[in-house]
Amino acid sequence: MGAGFLKAMRGAVIAVAALMGAATGVQAQSLASLPSEPGIIPRAEARPIAAWVTFCETYAAECAVDRSEPARIALTPAIWTTIVAINKRINKAVEPLTDMEHLNVADRWDLAEDGSGDCEDYQLLKRHLLALSGLPRRAMRMTVVIDEKGEGHAVLTLLTDRGDLILDNKTDLVLPWHRTGYVFIKRESQDAVAWVSLGGATSPVTTANR
């Protein structure tokens, strides 16, 4: 499947763009339903996940930080439609497999090029597509949490003018960070190719779960 899957997902961006500007009142989750709340305040620099370091060596453009980009996404109905649509599309399109099941390695980050992947692959692909749609990559940060099972898990944090919102392959809902039930550990910095602490518990070594 390889490049064909990624090409198809890029094509999906065009389909999503056709929805922009359409009425959003029919959506189960509307922009109007979101509270306006403060985001997480980053703390000191944190050690990155090892598999992210390798990912950045291969996909340098996906990790680059452009400080001229906005630090927050200004949510509009059209942008909200794009976020919700891409989140749902990728959650449905990617087959959930742990890296051990898929590649026989403990943890590997990529863009789910063959249509399979685990938590971080879903989120990296979502960010890739959202950036193609015009959203600032700097305002979309990969984030490590401890999930409801006590395991390391990766989500995508969207820093917006309505607070920090979370894209997750475990749900199609786009939730404010504090309503996920997760313990937030660290995320990519907005100012450098680095990570910052979010004040949670001890960081997991990997994020390799479905």
Image (spheres, helix red, strand yellow):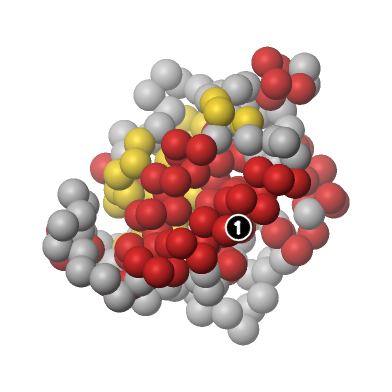
Residue sitting farthest toward the right: 57
At which x and y percent is residue 169?
45, 37
Could you tell me residue 67's position as x and y percent?
Answer: 63, 78
Please tell me which residue is depicted at 40% across the width and 69% down the height of the picture: 18
Q: Depth check: 75 or 184 in front?
A: 75
Picture coordinates of residue 187, whole percent (x, y): 56, 50
Q: Residue at x 63, y 35 (%)?
A: 115
Let me know if residue 196 appears in the view.
no
151 lies above or below 124: above
| Residue 23 place in picture, x, y as percent | 20, 69
Which amino acid type is shown beneath numbered disc 1? Answer: Arg
Residue occupied by mark 1: 10
Query: Residue at the location (55% across, 35% down)?
Result: 94
Q: Which residue is at the front of the view, 95 or 104?
A: 95
**In percent of the image, x 62 and y 84: which residue is there?**
68
Q: Is residue 207 above or below residue 188?
A: above
* Quadrant into which the N terminus falls: top right
Is residue 152 shown above or below 12?
above
Residue lying furthest bottom: 68
Picture quadrant of residue 17: bottom left
- Image check: 23 left or right of 99? left
Q: Visible in this render: residue 14?
A: yes
Q: In the rendered picture of this protein, how many numbered marks are placed on residues?
A: 1
Please tell me how crowded label 1 is: few (under 14), some (14-19), or many (20+) other residues with Cα within 10 Å. some
Quadrant in which residue 49 is drawn:
top right
Q: Viewer-proximal residue, 4 or 127?
A: 4
Q: Look at the picture and state if 127 lies above or below 131.
A: above
**Secondary structure state at the residue bearing disc 1:** helix
